[in-house]
Image (cartoon, rainbow, N blue to C red):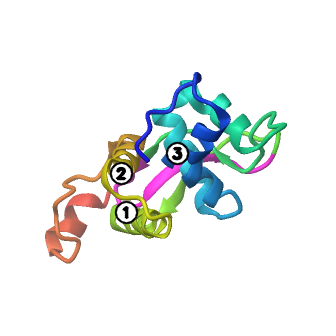
Amino acid sequence: MHTEINPHMSADELRDSWQGRVIYATRYEPLGMTVLSVIAQSYDDAMPFLMHALFPGFESITTPFICSAGKINKNGNVVADVIWRDWEDPSKNEVIANSTQSLRDVFRKLADGLDLWGKDRIELFLAVRKWVVADQRLDPDMDPMDPDAKRLTQH
């Protein structure tokens, strides 16, 4: 069901949205922290309503959680800042996925498992793409097996 979530939707509509289904499906999974960050990046205004619909009595997310958008570091890892425990400063540039391909693959598996197709699947992957806000690789298309790749990226 294609849905642009908004605060005016009923709890059932929010739960049935692809965003609600993806969050709920990953609530106990390590991927869940990335899913929350991805969806919050694109649907920030609707997040409080969505979380209350999914988890009655919801007050706040708990640690650990991602507190930044994702970025690709110079080694090709997808990284983000994570708060692991209450009252601690964020741990900077934690590896979320070893590569953009592994991030894509884990989201593909999630989308396949939830039977997300069409516009819902496209919106999920657009949200993932939007979540990755920076690419710090020297040349994202460079073959890492190329001898010049090591020479050009090491400082």
Please provide percent x and percent y for residue 25: 62, 60
Determine the residue positioned at 35% across, 42% down. Answer: 134
- Observer-side mark, 1 or 2, equals 2
Dividing the picture into quarters, in which one does residue 112 lie?
Answer: bottom left
**Is disc 3 in contact with disc 1, using a CB cutoff of under 8 Å?**
no
Could you give the CA–CA distance between mark 1 and mark 2, rounded to whole angstroms?
Answer: 8 Å
Q: Which secondary structure, mark 2?
A: helix
Q: Which residue is mark 2?
A: 125
Tell which of 5 and 138 is nearer to you: 5
Tell which of 144 and 21 is nearer to you: 21
Task: State whether residue 53 appears in this view.
Answer: yes
- Observer-side mark, 3 or 2, equals 3
Q: Is residue 150 above or below residue 130?
A: below
Please provide percent x and percent y for residue 103: 42, 62
Could you give the CA–CA distance between mark 3 and mark 2, rounded to whole angstroms?
Answer: 12 Å
Which circle's residue, 3 or 1, is located before the other in the chain? 3
Determine the residue positioned at 44% across, 64% down. Answer: 115
Could you give the CA–CA distance between mark 3 and mark 1, rounded to whole angstroms?
Answer: 17 Å
Q: Which residue is mark 1?
A: 104
User: Which region is colored magenta?
Assistant: 71-85
- Observer-side mark, 3 or 1, equals 3
Q: Is residue 79 magenta?
A: yes
